[in-house]
Amino acid sequence: MSGTRADGRAPEELRPIGIAIGVQRDPHGSVQIRCGHTVVLCAASVSDKVPDWLAGKGRGWVTAEYSMLPGSSGTRVPRVQKGRAEEIQRLVGRALRMSIDLDALGERLVTVDCDVIQADAGTRCASITGGMVALELACRRLVAEGKLAASPIRRRVCAVSVAVAGGEPLLDPDYSEDRHADVDTNLVFTDDGRLVEVQGTAESEPFGIETLDRIVRLGLDGARRLFEAQAAALARS
């Protein structure tokens, strides 16, 4: 790929990523993930009370809640959020459930709260990538406390955005790129290179299969680097 972006990155380059673990005392697992100027606090809390429809079945559940804090963007965000926030938290929950053996989790509910401290695009992807680390930390704690014999994590997941501008796919766009993109996609991957979910929208003109193929391949390259960042963070725990 050719060309340099406004922030100096190449089209196939991620924003700088940082994952700090154990940033809150009380949740079973917590991280703060930073992707460029996007910052999200992810906290995994474990409860012995599962949803009523799972009660007595010996099976666990993982869900997520997502919110943008009032000062996270240029215009104050209200504390009560509907619509977009609900759609994002359902996505985060679906993605994280793909990582875990719910039967091995036992009759427990893990809630992963994702609070956006600073938004500069890619907040849902950061929530999934950071939420995965928080979830795994929570499972490790359950093992350390003797509540589980082994971690129920089967695989890791992460998510990355790809935008298309002027016919060129751009990995991990910031807000200035995302708002003017011709195509906006979010991709959720497993650590063995498979897809969990693809969200893609043409903003002006439809895009072809060949463009989708370029988007997925670029996203997978970015995901491999995100998995490396997850592994490095977990190695510090």
Image (spheres, grey):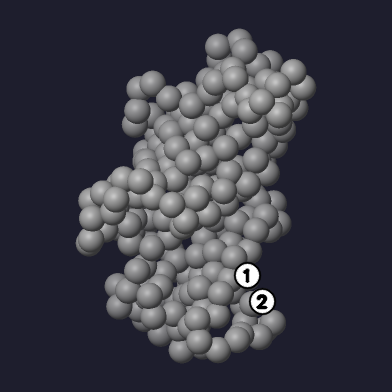
At label 2, the amino acid type is Asp
At x 35%, y 46%, the residue is 80
Q: Disc 1 vs disc 2: Cβ atoms closer than 8 Å? A: yes
Q: CA distance from mark 1 to mark 2?
A: 5 Å
Point out which mark residue 213 bears. 2
188 vs 13: above or below: above
At label 1, the amino acid type is Val
**Residue 18 in the image: x percent, y percent?**
37, 48
At x 44%, y 45%, the residue is 66
**Residue 23 in the image: x percent, y percent?**
34, 31
Point out which mark residue 28 bears. none
**Residue 200: quarter of image:** bottom right
Point out which mark residue 216 bears. 1
| Total numbered circles | 2
Judged from the image, the secondary structure of the residue bearing numbered disc 2 is helix
Identify which residue, 80 or 16, lies in the foreground: 80
190 vs 30: above or below: below
Image side of residue 32 versus residue 127, left or right: left
**Residue 199 in the image: x percent, y percent?**
59, 65
Identify which residue, 57 or 225, lies in the foreground: 57
Judged from the image, the secondary structure of the residue bearing numbered disc 1 is helix
At x 38%, y 55%, the residue is 35
